[in-house]
Amino acid sequence: MLVNKKEGYMKCIIFGVLLIVLTSPVNAQQTTTIDPGVTPDSFLWGLDKAFDQVTLLLVAGDVDKAKKGLEIAEERLAEIREMIKENKLGEAKKAQEAHGKTLLKVKEKVKEVEEDDSLQEIEKVIEIEKELEKHDDDVEQTFGELKVKIEIKGEITQEQKDLINSILNSLKGQTGEVEIEIENKKNKIKIEIEQETDKSEGEIEIEIESIEKEKGVKKQKKALEAIEDADEELNKFLEEAGEENITISQDVLDQFNSLLDQAKSKFDQGNYVEARRLAKQAEKLLDDEKEEEELNENGIKVEIKDGKAEVVVEIGDSKWKFELETTDLDTIINEIAVRTGLSSEEINAIMKVEIDGDEEEQEAGDENEGLEEDEE
């Protein structure tokens, strides 16, 4: 009798899952949720993943399947973030591996995109590229937030820190593989367009850039920002090393300059994905050297001037620099919290505020009184 009851429960569960799958609208364009939902530390996580795979199978077309795959990858990313925050690193590793498997399927769907018209085909690939760009931004944000938590809290062992870094670097690598596949696919289609039409390579590039602009792809801007950031990091590194009387390895400087020169060359050639990758690699080289020389410092500087706030946040090898159209300290702290994932208490502990260029700096832990009066 007990067995029959258990079988009945299982049938109800299976029927319920199938009912949800079959009655839910299958749409790869729907808004992606950042709520991790069921996480790898739950016995239901396997069922959650199975449900994702069923919904993926029900999506028609390679482009929509790729987009749905990226939506599922977003869910895995949220799970990784949650598990690392809870210091459940084994579970975070499981989610990272599932994230990689999902992106492998996205990569395969990129390869399989086909249209009779080559321009329509490249437009479909660019649609996937736009969605991947959003996911890549989320990976970067997660990377920054969690690195900051590691530096601020300092409550984990070196072994745990190494595992977290490994997980986060793997995320970047997994996303990078899909980026490269998209570039390869686009280059292949460009050759097909050239063969099918009398257009020159330059004319084709202009047409493709127009489609990318229309779809909102910003890879050129992101590549340029990565190169500028690497240049800025080098100048800062040299300045800090001079102040601390530390000798920088010439080998590191040579490797950095070589990578950055390659990045600039790739940028000039229009290969923005590779340019960004090389610039990021150059910057990481400096970050690793900084960590070895212990030049990283945690700090937040807010300069209040002309009714605006210029904010610079540096936590370990992570950096944020932005301007806000406000002088309200609570608003500024809230924005820093949103961008970095730090709590207001963690921000106040390391933030200094400079008003109207005064030499004397005000500790953020002080009350906000007098801030508006100083500006008048």
Image: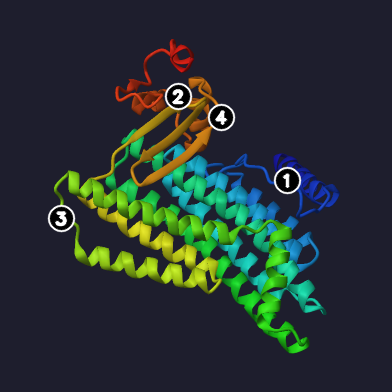
Residue 344 disc label = 2
Would you say 11 lies left or right of 235 here? right
Instruction: Name the quadrant containing residue 155.
Output: top left
Of 60 and 39, nearer the camera is 60
Q: CA distance from mark 4 to mark 1?
A: 29 Å
Residue 211 at x, y = what percent?
A: 73, 65
- The residue beneath circle 4 is 325
Residue 216 at x, y = what percent?
A: 69, 56
Work out whether mark 2 precedes mark 3 in sequence or the reverse, and give the earlier one: 3
Q: CA distance from mark 3 to mark 4?
A: 40 Å
Q: CA distance from mark 1 to mark 2?
A: 29 Å
Eye-nearest disc, 2 or 3: 3
Dot 3 falls on a residue whose secondary structure is loop
Instruction: Name the quadrant containing residue 31.
Output: top right
Q: Are marks 3 and 1 in contact (CB under 8 Å)?
A: no
Residue type, mark 3 in image:
Thr
Dot 2 falls on a residue whose secondary structure is helix
Work out whether mark 4 precedes mark 1 in sequence or the reverse, and give the earlier one: 1
Residue 27 at x, y = what percent?
A: 79, 53
Q: Are marks 4 and 1 in contact (CB under 8 Å)?
A: no
Question: Residue 287, can we see it?
Answer: no
Residue 31 disc label = 1
The residue that appears at 61% across and 44% down in the rendered structure is 44
Would you say 307 lies left or right of 194 here? left
Work out whether mark 4 precedes mark 2 in sequence or the reverse, and give the earlier one: 4
